[in-house]
Image: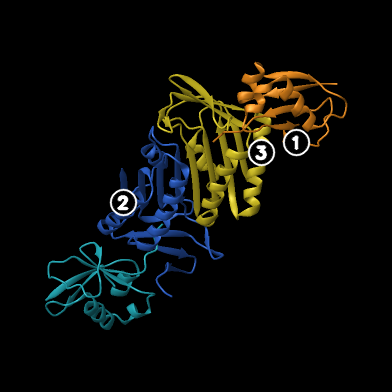
Chain colours: A orange, B cyan, C blue, D yellow
Amino acid sequence: MKVNVLAFGIAKDIFGKPAVAVEVEENTTVATLKSALEAQFPRLKQLSSFMIAVNSEYAQADNVLQARDEIAIIPPVSGG
Amino acid sequence: MKVNVLAFGIAKDIFGKPAVAVEVEENTTVATLKSALEAQFPRLKQLSSFMIAVNSEYAQADNVLQARDEIAIIPPVSGG
Amino acid sequence: MIDIKVTEAPLDIPACINWVMSPQSGGIDVFIGTVRDATQGKPVLRLEFEAYVPMAMREMTKLAEQALEKWPLHKVLLHHRTGVLPIGDVPVVIAVSAAHRAAAFDACRFLIDTLKQTVPIWKKEIFEDGEVWVAAHP
Amino acid sequence: MIDIKVTEAPLDIPACINWVMSPQSGGIDVFIGTVRDATQGKPVLRLEFEAYVPMAMREMTKLAEQALEKWPLHKVLLHHRTGVLPIGDVPVVIAVSAAHRAAAFDACRFLIDTLKQTVPIWKKEIFEDGEVWVAAHP
């Protein structure tokens, strides 16, 4: 299945656009998506860390993705 | 000598006026003035505590009063 | 920089905040005291504040100077009002600016805590059935 | 009661303070973040804030709910701005009212500290010679 990953902050700069479509297996976990993103965009590995949000909530590594989920990459936050 | 003692808050209520003149010896200390005030206004003894200010500064018990000092009785403060 | 005021006029909170702002500052902490409608469950009608003004100004200035010595602050403002204040009105505004927020928070809290202990200002609570000078009696 | 906003429009500090005031409250603590003219000694020209708005709103709401559980508060307001902000401008306002000041101070500090750790908002510092997403790299 194809998932669309929204990007913000430095992740948007690394992607070169505000979202990328990533081809993943059915029942892919958040951990697998993170690895796929790092393979496609090696500069992500230079970040202090990054999280994945699913439907506007921080996701755990073993969360399973659905095709209709809203997925976002969350680089280290720095608001305030 | 006579010293004029300004009063605020509950001390003004106890004096019944915003200042009282108290007759004291020359070279009277703050401690002696406090005793004289307590003798003249026994309700002062019911307060949690009270301080004497001399020339807009908290005074110590052994400070010696001068006739030209501005003297005030400072009951427990409660601003803010 | 220090700005101290003891006044019968209403306190101007936006003006207080504007005064402490500076291009060097990253954080401002503001404490605003307001007149509460009850004390220990008993309804309060209004408060009355009395100050020994010259000494209050001096003590407030000392507090601001102490805060500037203890923390790396840019500006410190303490304004206190006197007179009769209805519920919801503002007797005190303390505002502190600093490069970093920890200093602003710590200083602001020190200032209000110490103001309540040392500055010669007195508060009378007026109830339906009487009135009390706060903290006067044990 | 909770008021959360993530907006491109300038934050209205007096309106924020009015919103948290209540007759039950005795103390209000307000934290105002401001754009500092330098970071670690290096001049900053301006900041740019980007937010993942729906998630930021959700995380800010969670923080406000946590604060209301941890402390006896009346009202909690968190407003954060996005877009390009010049020096001196205000990216964040946090205001908390409570019957007693200790809860207001503690909650306000918890809110800004935790907002900086969890809320999906990103800050870019723009210098003479380049720009940096804050905290992105080790």
Q: Residue at x 64, y 30 (%)?
A: A75
Q: Which residue is mark 3?
A: D59
Subunit of mark 2? C
Three-letter amino acid code of the residue under disc 1:
Ala
Q: Does dot 2 land on a helix, a strand or a loop? A: helix
Give the distance between the C-alpha atoms of the residues marked 3 and 1, in whole angstroms. 13 Å
The image position of residue C96, as x and y in percent, is 40, 45
Q: Which disc number belongs to residue A59? A: 1
Q: Residue at x 46, y 24 (%)?
A: D46
The image position of residue B21, as x and y in percent, is 18, 74
Can residue A70 be spotted in the picture? no
Asked where in the image residue B48 lies, by quadrant, the reply is: bottom left
Q: Which quadrant does the N terminus of chain A fall into?
A: top right
Can residue B9 be spotted in the picture? yes
Q: Which disc number belongs to residue C23? A: none
Q: Residue at x 43, y 23 (%)?
A: D45
- In the rendered image, residues at marks 3 and 2 fall on the same chain: no
A63 vs D64, left or right, is: right
Looking at this rendering, what residue extends furthest in the right direction? A26
